[in-house]
Amino acid sequence: LVGYEGQTISGYFDWRVVSWSSTGTLRWSWSYNHAVSGAYDEAYGIEADNQNPAWLYVVGRVSDTPTEKGHIVRLNSTNGGLLWRRLYDTTSNVFPITAVAVDSSNNLYFTGTAFSGSSNINTFKLSGNTASTSVAVWTRTIDSGTGVFSADNGYGIAVKNNDVIVTGGLNRSDNGLQAMTTIKYDLSGNQIWQTSIPGTSGGYYGRDVKIASDGGIIV
């Protein structure tokens, strides 16, 4: 279980990750407050490592000087101990990471939203063996091109076999609403296709994505 908790006095937020047993017994609870006081530190996504069951990855955002940055954490899944953490930002002013996926070779894939006046869907890959310090193996950006007030957001990511699937929302140029957008990459970051379902009165958002056993995609 991953999310964030309000600080009663200040009204700001800290990360919170909780592990339960199959019978509902609390195993451990881990919280995190970044260096900047009075900040919105929010955890959004969590994924277990397929090859290393003791590793658990958590992503989100933290307030850091001078802007908010993406935050990646590896925890020990058995006791909640911190193994490593790192800030990850782009040239954008704000970069929350909203989802993480792990492939069979322990490589990590992330998606989020890069804000700098407008916003873009930002997806990147880190090598699993050096993820705590390495630069991205590749980074891909999707921009609707609708201008400074566009709100293009990446929310969900899944990896299976040679497929990396990202979902989120892209601004429509005709009415400014978001369309549910899904993008398929291969493991090398080559875009295979991109498709959208147009938003109507309230817009559509792809919040999470799964890859079925037959390769089908569910958003």
Image (cartoon, helix red, strand yellow):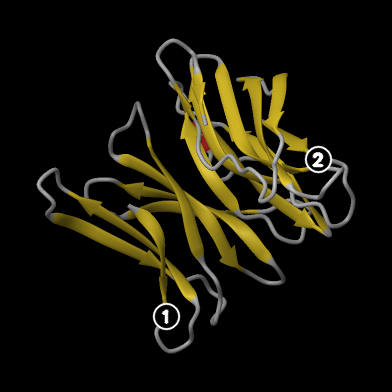
Among the 4 quarters of the image, the one containing residue 51? top left
| Residue type of the residue flagged with mark 1 | Gln
Is residue 64 visible in this depiction of the protein?
Answer: yes
Drawn side of residue 33 relative to residue 166, left or right: left
Q: Name the residue under label 1.
A: 7
Q: Is residue 198 above or below residue 218?
A: below
> On the image, numbered disc 2 is attached to which residue?
143
Residue drawn where x is 67% and y is 47% of the image: 203
Instruction: Classify 33 as above or below 196.
Output: below
Tags 1 and 2 touching, CB below 8 Å: no
Residue 23 location in percent, x, y? 9, 47
Residue type pointed to by label 2: Asp
Q: Where is residue 88 in the image (x, y as percent from the top left)?
A: 63, 52
Q: Characterize the local packing of mark 1: few (<14), some (14-19) or many (20 or more) Cα atoms within 10 angstroms.
A: few
Instruction: Residue lying at the far bottom in this picture: please name it.
Output: 9
Work out whether residue 202 or residue 51 is closer to the camera in this orientation and state it.
Answer: 202
Q: Which residue lies furthest to the front in this view?
A: 201
**Residue at the spot 15% in from the left edge and 47% down from the top edge:** 21
Q: Quadrant of residue 86?
A: bottom right
Closest to the observer, 3 or 31: 3
Q: Which of marks 1 and 2 is nearer the N terminus?
A: 1
